[in-house]
Image: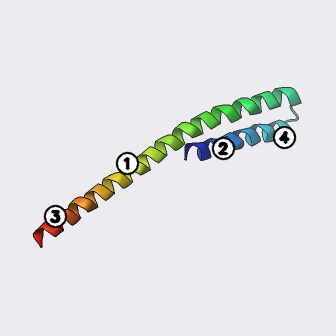
Amino acid sequence: MGRAYAGIMGTLGFFTVTSRAVLHAAGTEQSLLQACLAMFGLAGIGYVLGSIAQSTVEESVRTQIARELVAQEATAKKK
């Protein structure tokens, strides 16, 4: 999930900066440098956020499965 978020956020950052540069008729070299910096910066942030989201979801699923297994064992012991 981290790689997917990194790809999405990096691309979004790149196109946002290039769109701004086109609208303001900015210089090409400086605009591409800023776009690349935004892409790498946001990709890093996206990777971290995606990794946190993935670990949160996995932990939630593990906890839910553990609860269900305990409930099934308790039900089986009652029978």
Q: Is residue 54 above or below residue 21?
A: below
**Label 1: which secondary element:** helix
For the residues labelled 1 and 2, the Cα–Cα distance comes to 24 Å
The tag earlier along the polypeptide, 2 or 4, is 2
The tag earlier along the polypeptide, 4 or 3, is 4
Which of label 1 and label 4 is nearer to you? 1
Q: Which residue is mark 4?
A: 23
Q: Residues within 10 Å of mark 2 (few under 14, many from 20)?
A: some
Query: Left or right: where does residue 27 sit relative to residue 9?
Result: right
The percent position of residue 12, horizontal first and vertical second, equals 70, 44
Direction bottom: furthest residue: 79
Q: Quadrant of the C terminus?
A: bottom left
**Label 4: which secondary element:** helix
Which amino acid lies under the numbered mark 4 shown in the image of this protein?
Leu
Tag shown at residue 59: 1
The tag earlier along the polypeptide, 1 or 2, is 2
Q: Is residue 69 above or below residue 60?
A: below
Q: Which residue is mark 2?
A: 7
Asked whether the beta carbons under mark 1 and mark 4 sit within 8 Å of each other, the answer is: no
On the question of residue 27 being in view, the answer is no
For the residues labelled 3 and 2, the Cα–Cα distance comes to 45 Å
Which amino acid lies under the numbered mark 3 shown in the image of this protein?
Ala
**Label 2: which secondary element:** helix
Which amino acid lies under the numbered mark 1 shown in the image of this protein?
Glu
Q: Which residue is mark 3?
A: 74
Which of label 3 and label 2 is nearer to you? 3
Tag shown at residue 33: none
Which amino acid lies under the numbered mark 2 shown in the image of this protein?
Gly
**Label 3: which secondary element:** helix
Q: Residues within 10 Å of mark 1 (few under 14, many from 20)?
A: few
